[in-house]
């Protein structure tokens, strides 16, 4: 991710084909380019996001 300024998100970079993981991959890419995670005040959502984003950006 990030090579030559290119980032990818969606089911092509997730371990399974699901809407929730595709959305998380989009949040992860947005965070890589400077956006803040929009649900940081929800501890359960933040925990799941942090867990799954590692699968999407590696």
Image (spheres, grey):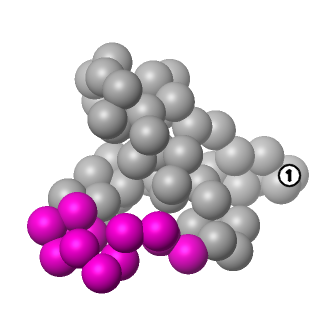
At x 43%, y 33%, the residue is 22
Q: Nearer the viewer, residue 21 or 40?
A: 40
Q: Position of residue 13 (x, y in %)?
A: 47, 32
> In this rendering, is residue 1 above or below 23?
below
Q: Residue furthest bottom?
A: 41
User: Disc 1 on helix, strand or loop?
Assistant: helix
Q: Count all numbered tags in the image, as a single digit.
A: 1
Q: Residues within 10 Å of mark 1 (few under 14, many from 20)?
A: few
Residue situated in front as seen by the camera: 10 or 13: 10
The residue depicted at 78 percent of the width and 46 percent of the height is 6
Q: Where is residue 32 in the image (x, y as percent from the top left)?
A: 62, 66
Residue farthest to the left, as pictured: 44
Q: What residue is at 31 percent from the left and 23 percent from the top?
A: 18
Q: Can residue 33 be seen in this view?
A: yes
* Location of residue 20 (image quadrant): top left
Q: In this view, does 48 lie to the left or right of 56?
A: left
Residue bearing the label numbered 1: 4
Does 51 lie within the magenta span? Answer: no
Q: Which image quadrant is residue 39 in?
A: bottom left
Q: Name the outermost residue toward the right.
A: 4
Percent across and percent down for residue 29 are: 59, 54
Residue 25 lies left or right of residue 30; in this view the side is left
Q: What's the magenta region?
A: 36-47
The answer to whether 6 is drawn above or below residue 31 in the figure is above
Left or right for 42, reference 1? left
Residue that appears at 51% across and 55% down: 27
Question: Magenta segment: does it hold 42?
Answer: yes
Residue 51 visible to an observer of this rendering? no
């Amino acid at each position: 991710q990030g090579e030559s300024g290119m980032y990818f998100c969606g089911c092509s970079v997730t371990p399974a084909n699901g809407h929730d993981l595709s959305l998380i991959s989009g949040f992860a890419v947005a965070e890589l380019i400077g956006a803040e995670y929009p649900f940081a005040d929800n501890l359960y959502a933040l925990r799941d996001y942090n867990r799954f984003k590692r699968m999407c950006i590696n």
